[in-house]
Amino acid sequence: MGGGTNPSDSKWMDPLLGLAWASSGGPSLQIGTAVLVAPLRHPVLLAKQVSTLDVLTGGRVILGLGGGWMKEEAAVLNTSFETVAADCRK
């Protein structure tokens, strides 16, 4: 990704829905994210989605969370990059 812009027709899919689909590939597959940008999601909804996926897959979910690294991500949240960075250090 490299910090550049992506074309508007990029095939960026929702990672949790993608994991739900991937989990059907085999009952012993571990599934997970590298890093999911947590501030882009409501924390209660994210917790419910991940816990539901974990139950449905028999505990096979590995979740990587991060605070984001692009100023554009903070702009989507209508906050400053410095605020998001400070919150992630807490």
Image: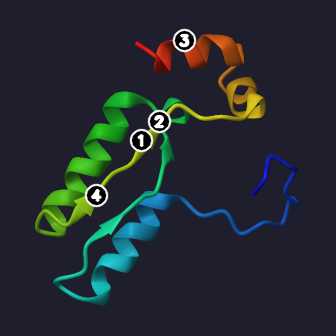
**Residue pointed to by mark 4:** 62
Q: Residue at x 25, y 73 (%)?
A: 30
Q: Name the spot of residue 57 as percent of width and height, x first.
A: 18, 69
Q: Residues within 10 Å of mark 2 (few under 14, many from 20)?
A: some
Whole-Å distance between the Cαs marked 1 and 2? 6 Å
Q: Amino acid at mark 3?
A: Ala
Marks 3 & 2, CB-CB < 8 Å contact: no
Q: Name the mark on residue 44.
A: none
**Residue pointed to by mark 2:** 38
The answer to whether 10 is drawn above or below residue 3 in the figure is: below
Q: Name the spot of residue 26 as percent of width and height, x first.
A: 24, 88
Q: Residues within 10 Å of mark 4 (few under 14, many from 20)?
A: few
Q: Earlier in the sequence, mark 3 or mark 4?
A: 4
Whole-Å distance between the Cαs marked 4 and 1? 10 Å
**Residue pointed to by mark 3:** 86
Marks 4 & 2, CB-CB < 8 Å contact: no
Q: Is residue 79 visible?
A: no
Q: Looking at this view, is 16 or 31 the one in front?
A: 31
In front: label 4 or label 2? 4
Marks 1 & 2, CB-CB < 8 Å contact: yes
Q: Amino acid at mark 1?
A: Leu
Secondary-structure class at tag 4: strand
Q: Amino acid at mark 2?
A: Ala
**Residue 64 vs residue 62: left or right?**
right
Q: Looking at this view, is 13 or 34 the one in front?
A: 34
**Residue pointed to by mark 1:** 65
Marks 1 & 3, CB-CB < 8 Å contact: no
Secondary-structure class at tag 3: helix
Q: Residue at x 28, y 58 (%)?
A: 62
Q: Amino acid at mark 4?
A: Ile
Whole-Å distance between the Cαs marked 3 and 2? 14 Å
Whole-Å distance between the Cαs marked 1 and 3? 16 Å
